[in-house]
């Protein structure tokens, strides 16, 4: 969390972010900085940094945002999110028309004594596809709904990192079901599955993916026949079709096993279609073995990583270690070597 402040970074960016809201690099940088602001807000609270000693305000003030509400966890009273409102010096600026009016940002896990117990508990809920059952998600969801209903038609962004990206995915998915499609910037979003992407041998990796797809599709067919009948579309298929028009931005690093599996998740779907096995992969991409297992036990499960469509942005710049590969700070760096692919489900 001890990173340079925005004004120390901006000299390396070719255009000031608030002046060019159509620039993808600047949109990414601003969203990442506002997520960083939430991390620093919580550290300010832990270290009792107040007023002029607070380190968080520059992270939003530099981009002409105001922090209008902190989102506080009801268990450990930590700040896990914040609502920012864009307030440019002049509302007549043409660029302001393309800017978000609100950005709702969520932090990830902080491994300090004040937060580690609660955050790790939520990480476990996420791994078990149960983040939607937690009070932190309920607080986040209510906040997003309140902003959307109070300011209909306003451009609202969601942004999150790691555990916070999971929260943003879940709130974004639920807003889609209510008819609202929010731009979502998801940094190092968790993918709950074996990290096959880390296998270096491409043939072995591809073989593992095919095997997992066949097993997942077979289990899905068996579960569907058992619970719903062969002539009905599954709940997973219905949910997938509803979500297919929502295209969040996924920012992943191949060196980060928490999120790297998204690379293979989308590419494998395309490969299977090319092999003529699109039907198998369509079933596999709508389900996960873990989700099917939990549901077979009668547990309520909502896997966040099963996304129909996305803009996948991969940082293939060298990462010195896992800490950097999983960190938020990489996403506002200049001159990143990014590979971008658009995946649309049909």
Image (tube, helix red, strand yellow):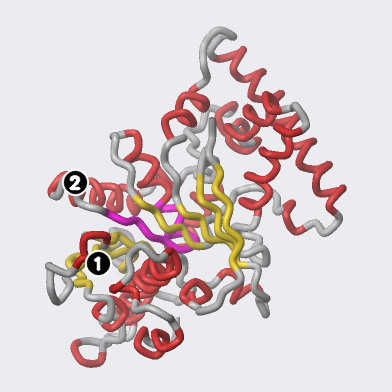
Q: Secondary structure at mark 1?
A: helix
Q: Which residue is depicted at the point 51% across and 16% down? A: 233
Q: Quadrant of residue 160?
A: bottom left
Residue 175, x across and y down, in percent? 32, 41
Q: Is residue 88 visible?
A: yes
Spot occupied by residue 333 in the image (x, y as percentages of width and height): 50, 78
Mark 2 nearby-residue class (10 Å; few <14, some 14–19, many ≥20): few
Q: Which mark is residue 95?
A: 1
Q: Nearer the viewer, mark 2 or mark 1?
A: 1
Q: Residue 289, which numbered label?
A: none
Q: Which residues are magenta?
A: 156-168
Residue situated in front as seen by the camera: 282 or 45:
282
Q: Position of residue 71 (x, y in %)?
A: 26, 62
Residues at circles 2 and 1 in contact by the CB criterion of under 8 Å: no
Residue 117 is left or right of residue 16, and the answer is right
Residue ID at (60%, 13%):
226
Mark found first going from the N terminus, 2 or 1: 1
From this viewpoint, is residue 115 visible? Answer: no
Name the element at disc 2.
loop
Q: On screen, 292 above or below 151? A: above
The residue wearing badge 2 is 153
User: Does residue 280 belong to the magenta stretch?
Assistant: no
- Measuring 87% from the left and 48% from the top, which residue is drawn there? 203
* Image quarter in which the C terminus is found: top right
């Amino acid at each position: 969390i001890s990173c340079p402040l925005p004004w120390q970074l901006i000299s390396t960016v070719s255009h000031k972010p608030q002046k060019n809201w159509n620039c993808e690099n600047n949109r990414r940088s601003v969203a990442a900085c506002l997520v960083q602001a939430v991390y620093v807000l919580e550290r300010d609270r832990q270290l009792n940094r107040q007023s002029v000693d607070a380190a968080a305000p520059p992270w939003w003030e530099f981009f002409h945002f105001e922090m209008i509400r902190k989102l506080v966890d009801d268990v450990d009273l930590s700040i896990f999110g914040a609502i920012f409102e864009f307030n440019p010096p002049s509302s007549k600026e043409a660029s302001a028309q393309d800017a978000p009016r609100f950005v709702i940002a969520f932090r990830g896990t902080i491994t300090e004594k004040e937060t580690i117990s609660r955050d790790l508990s939520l990480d476990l809920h996420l791994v078990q596809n149960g983040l939607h059952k937690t009070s932190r998600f309920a607080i986040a969801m209510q906040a997003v709904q309140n902003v959307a209903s109070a300011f209909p038609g306003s451009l609202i962004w969601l942004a999150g990192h790691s555990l916070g990206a999971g929260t943003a995915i879940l709130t974004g998915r639920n807003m889609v079901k209510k008819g609202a499609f929010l731009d979502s910037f998801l940094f190092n979003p968790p993918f709950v599955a074996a990290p096959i992407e880390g296998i270096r041998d491409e043939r072995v990796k591809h073989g593992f993916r095919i095997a997992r797809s066949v097993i997942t599709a077979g289990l899905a067919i068996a579960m569907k026949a058992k619970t719903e009948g062969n002539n009905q579309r599954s709940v997973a298929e219905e949910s997938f079709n509803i979500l297919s028009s929502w295209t969040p931005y996924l920012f992943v690093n191949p060196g980060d096993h928490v999120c790297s599996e998204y690379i293979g998740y989308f590419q494998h779907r395309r490969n299977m279609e090319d092999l003529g096995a699109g039907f198998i992969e369509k079933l596999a991409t709508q389900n996960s073995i873990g989700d099917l297992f939990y549901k077979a036990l009668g547990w309520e499960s909502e896997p966040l990583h099963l996304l129909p469509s996305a803009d996948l942005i991969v940082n293939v710049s060298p990462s010195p270690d896992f800490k950097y590969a999983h960190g938020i700070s990489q996403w506002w760096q200049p001159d990143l070597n990014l590979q971008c692919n658009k995946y649309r489900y049909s």
